[in-house]
Image (tube, coloured by chain):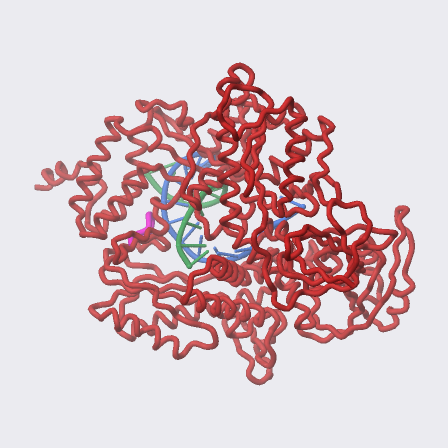
Chain colours: A red, B blue, C green
DNA sequence: GACTGTGGCCGTGGGT
DNA sequence: ACCCACGGCCAC
């Protein structure tokens, strides 16, 4: 029997002669594309009330809505449900579609206690049970069958993961980007507006295809007869290139659905799938586009989802993300004019083609750059790239747990019912502790933080839904969280605690290797492990989670508060002054102590910390500032600035790092903070401020510096309070511009009376003479710097340049 | 229909 | 003039 070593990329199933067959698509070690077909039977778990139910289940079959269903076997297995041993029944049915049918049926039976894992997708069940991890080497035995398929199909007789867990390398990526006919002010209309140009970029191809001729020397531009011919060329290119991954930027919701619709309209057969299928759309909250046998990597989904915390950007436009990650970009065409140029001035189309190709290129480069992260996620979670690309944090954690539960003989708890969900949503967790700072400028600060505080608490105290006990338990060694009146058994490692511990220790090992040598794949692995570890606490407190546990989530935060406050007390006893603390960090003033003493402080703490918990010395800062809050007289939490030893600034919470503040206010605030932290030079900062205020009054500043950006977070009609950005969104909608939740609204406040929203205007429609100097001075600049100058005793009047007069009066 | 958690600051509108 | 809900966005 021939043996094949191959890397699976995509997975589907089909019913062949009435039986379900899994199809794995991938590439062999020597680069050949193949598919592997493997018989597999769907099943789920039932916990019986009475043992006799087994026989009743075995004989279950019938018909519903003209479709027959049947149970093919029932097997008794010893399993665990939240740590408790149960006699479970593995109920195997003949087809995947029978699973929900049979589940609903037997759920009502008196002799069935509960039904589990009936909602795990069939292909995912297969991957878990066969221990197959996509993009990781798999060994298959079998013969090539005679199926209608673009690539050879091996009928598997045996399949198993390879021993060395080798990862797929050198994947072929093809980036796609289209430009469509889009008259100004009209919405997207796939039925009536054609695709004008389509760009592809891959390792061996970089080309724009368009169907209007114009004179050009660009060899990258290819002319075809019409739109149908463009789609034909796209089909040809995909078939020639045989990519493992097709990538795009919002290609889930735009490029691929658009291509699909136009192909349908023009009757172009886009049979690019390995099984001759076309682009398929899965409609959910937003569309997912799929091609059989090829992984579709939508870069925006990954950047906005899984990597959100690691990539901070004001906007998720391709340009913004590319400049953040790749440090390049900038195209200079007005895309709004494309339709007009296409109709009336085709000789001017070349820059649009360049733009189109540049977008495909940027997308390709982003996909290449992010692929290590996504690959590591695939290896960690064990689901195909297509799925990992689009997963939320909770799905990530849950998929990981479903992959791990077998090692603990656990069966997943059921998803909550609507009623249970409503109950869970009513309670609120108490969160972290934040120490209120005393406003002031400080020198010689040391900052500490607990390494992965919440994950390390979960692992070190065995916090897990299956180890929860009553607070007054007599169990030996049980750890009591008195704040939450609950205890945790220490007799046996809890499922989630063990899994979290494994994630943390794996990350520590990776970090150790990285200390010796740089490796982008290991960097990516460390990052994904950290993201995963940090997601467990949120998951435990997430009402829709299968392994939801209010007690666990509340205990994690309670212990977090306990550890941080104990550390604060110890720091004070050791002679430091505690300036600030938030959740897992502590800011100390050295009070004349040495840096060495500051570093040594962590040793005194770590000596008494359990398990994997560890306080880390984050660093030394020559100066730092905390300010008072707007209303109360106390210090503002979550707003501070520090000066690093290398001269750079750390700014947290201030307007300078917030999106919905004008550029000018951010600039001024940062400048003032810098002057004060570097030299405590408030006089110089004040002079600078006066200069800027003068400039604003004299209308010397560009409108662009006055722009305020605010996100529209819901449909315009559902707002109770109409703020400036909502008013602008309304205006835009009135002009026929498509405005949806998620849009970043830009506006400038102009002169006049009344509400701010009535004076807000689109930046493009605002002249430099029109912006309201008083608004920008009193509502943007002054509030941004007032509390900083207050530390030096400067009043608002002084900031506005009225100080001299006031003093004269006082004299 | 999907959605990881809480703590916190502050501007604006909407009401008195 | 004042209070407070709404809304956005940030820290962790």
Residue A655 lies, in percent from the top left, at 35, 44
Span shown in magenta: A626-632
Front residue (pair A62, A318): A318
Front residue (pair A664, A348): A348
Residue A685 lies, in percent from the top left, at 20, 44
Q: Is residue A476 visible?
A: yes
Front residue (pair A22, A609): A22
Image quadrant where residue A259 sits: top right
Image quadrant where residue A49 sits: bottom right
Residue A657 lies, in percent from the top left, at 36, 46
Q: Quadrant of the C terminus of chain A?
A: top left
Residue A84 vertical position relative to residue A145 in the rendered view, above or below: below
- Is A244 included in the stretch rendered in magenta? no
Which residue: 25% across, 44% down?
A671
Which residue: 51% across, 60% down?
A525
How many marks on residues? 0
Q: Is residue A423 visible?
A: no
Which residue: 67% across, 74% down?
A83
Residue A618 vertical position relative to residue A147 in the rendered view, above or below: below
Residue A702 lies, in percent from the top left, at 31, 28
Kindly give the residue lying farthest to the top in the view shown. A344
């Amino acid at each position: 029997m021939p043996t094949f070593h191959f890397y699976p990329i995509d997975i589907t199933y089909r019913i062949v002669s009435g039986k379900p067959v899994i199809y794995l698509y991938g590439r062999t070690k020597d680069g050949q594309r193949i598919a592997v077909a493997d018989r597999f039977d769907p099943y789920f778990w039932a916990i019986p009330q009475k043992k006799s139910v087994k026989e009743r289940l075995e004989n279950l079959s019938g018909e519903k809505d003209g479709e027959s269903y049947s149970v093919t076997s029932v097997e008794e297995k010893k399993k665990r449900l939240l740590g408790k041993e149960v006699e479970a029944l593995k109920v195997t049915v003949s087809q995947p579609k029978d699973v929900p049918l049979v589940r609903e049926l037997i759920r009502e039976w008196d002799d069935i206690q509960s039904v589990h894992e009936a909602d795990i997708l069939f292909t995912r069940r297969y991957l878990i049970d066969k221990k197959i991890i996509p993009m990781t080497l798999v060994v298959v035995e079998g013969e090539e069958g005679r199926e209608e398929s673009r690539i050879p199909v091996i009928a598997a007789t045996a399949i198993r993961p390879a021993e060395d867990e080798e990862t797929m390398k050198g994947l072929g990526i093809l980036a796609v980007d289209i430009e469509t006919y889009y008259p100004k002010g009209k919405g997207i209309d796939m039925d009536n507006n054609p695709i004008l140009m389509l760009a592809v970029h891959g390792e061996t191809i970089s080309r724009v295809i368009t169907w209007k001729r114009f004179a050009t020397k660009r060899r990258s531009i290819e002319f075809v007869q019409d739109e149908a011919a463009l789609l034909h060329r796209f089909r040809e290119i995909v078939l020639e290139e045989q990519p493992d991954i097709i990538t795009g930027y919002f290609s889930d919701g735009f490029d691929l659905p658009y291509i699909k619709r136009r192909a349908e309209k023009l009757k172009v057969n886009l049979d690019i799938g390995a099984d001759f299928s076309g682009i398929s759309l899965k409609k959910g909250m937003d569309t997912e586009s799929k091609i059989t046998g090829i992984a579709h990597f939508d870069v925006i989904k990954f950047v906005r989802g899984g990597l959100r915390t690691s990539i901070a950007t004001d906007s998720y436009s391709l340009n913004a993300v590319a400049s953040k990650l790749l440090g390049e970009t900038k195209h200079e065409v007005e895309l709004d004019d494309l339709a007009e140029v296409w109709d009336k001035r085709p000789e001017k189309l070349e820059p649009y083609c360049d733009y189109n190709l540049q977008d495909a290129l940027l997308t390709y480069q982003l996909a290449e750059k992010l692929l290590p992260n996504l690959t590591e996620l695939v290896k960690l979670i064990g689901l195909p790239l297509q799925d990992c690309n689009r997963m939320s944090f909770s799905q990530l954690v849950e998929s990981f747990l479903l992959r791990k539960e077998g090692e603990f003989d656990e069966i997943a708890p059921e998803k909550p019912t609507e009623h249970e969900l409503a109950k869970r949503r009513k309670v609120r967790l108490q969160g972290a502790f934040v120490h209120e700072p005393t406003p002031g400028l400080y020198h010689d600060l040391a900052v500490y933080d607990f390494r992965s505080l919440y994950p390390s608490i979960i692992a070190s105290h065995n916090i897990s839904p299956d180890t929860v006990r009553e607070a007054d338990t007599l169990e030996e060694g049980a750890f009591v969280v008195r704040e939450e009146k609950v205890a945790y058994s220490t007799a046996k490692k809890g499922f989630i605690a063990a899994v979290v511990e494994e994630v943390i220790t794996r990350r520590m090992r990776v970090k150790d290797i990285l200390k010796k040598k740089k490796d982008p794949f290991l960097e990516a692995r460390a990052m994904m492990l950290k993201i995963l570890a940090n997601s467990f606490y949120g998951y435990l407190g997430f009402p829709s989670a299968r392994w939801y546990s209010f007690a666990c989530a509340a205990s994690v935060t309670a212990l977090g508060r306990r550890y941080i406050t104990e550390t604060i007390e110890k720091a004070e006893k050791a002679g430091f002054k505690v300036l600030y603390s938030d959740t897992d960090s502590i800011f100390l003033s050295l009070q004349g102590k040495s840096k060495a003493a500051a570093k040594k402080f962590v040793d005194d703490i770590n000596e008494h910390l359990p398990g994997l918990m560890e306080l880390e010395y984050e660093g030394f800062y020559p100066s730092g500032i905390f300010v008072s809050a707007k209303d109360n007289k106390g210090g503002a939490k979550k707003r501070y600035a520090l000066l690093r030893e290398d001269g750079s600034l750390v700014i947290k919470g201030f307007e300078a790092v917030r999106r919905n503040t004008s550029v000018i206010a951010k600039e001024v605030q940062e400048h003032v903070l810098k002057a004060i932290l570097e030299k405590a030079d408030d006089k110089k900062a004040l002079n600078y401020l006066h200069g800027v205020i003068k400039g604003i009054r004299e209308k010397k500043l560009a409108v662009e510096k006055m722009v305020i950006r605010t996100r529209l977070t819901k449909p315009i009609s559902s707002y109770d309070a109409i703020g400036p950005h909502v008013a602008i969104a309304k205006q835009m909608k009135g002009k026929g511009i498509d405005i949806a939740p998620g849009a970043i609204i830009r506006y400038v406040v102009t002169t006049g009376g009344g509400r701010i929203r009535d004076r807000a205007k689109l930046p493009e429609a605002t002249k430099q003479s029109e912006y309201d100097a008083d608004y920008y001075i009193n509502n943007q600049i002054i509030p941004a710097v007032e509390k900083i100058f207050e530390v030096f005793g400067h009043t608002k009047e002084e900031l506005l340049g009225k100080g001299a007069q006031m003093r004269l009066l006082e004299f």
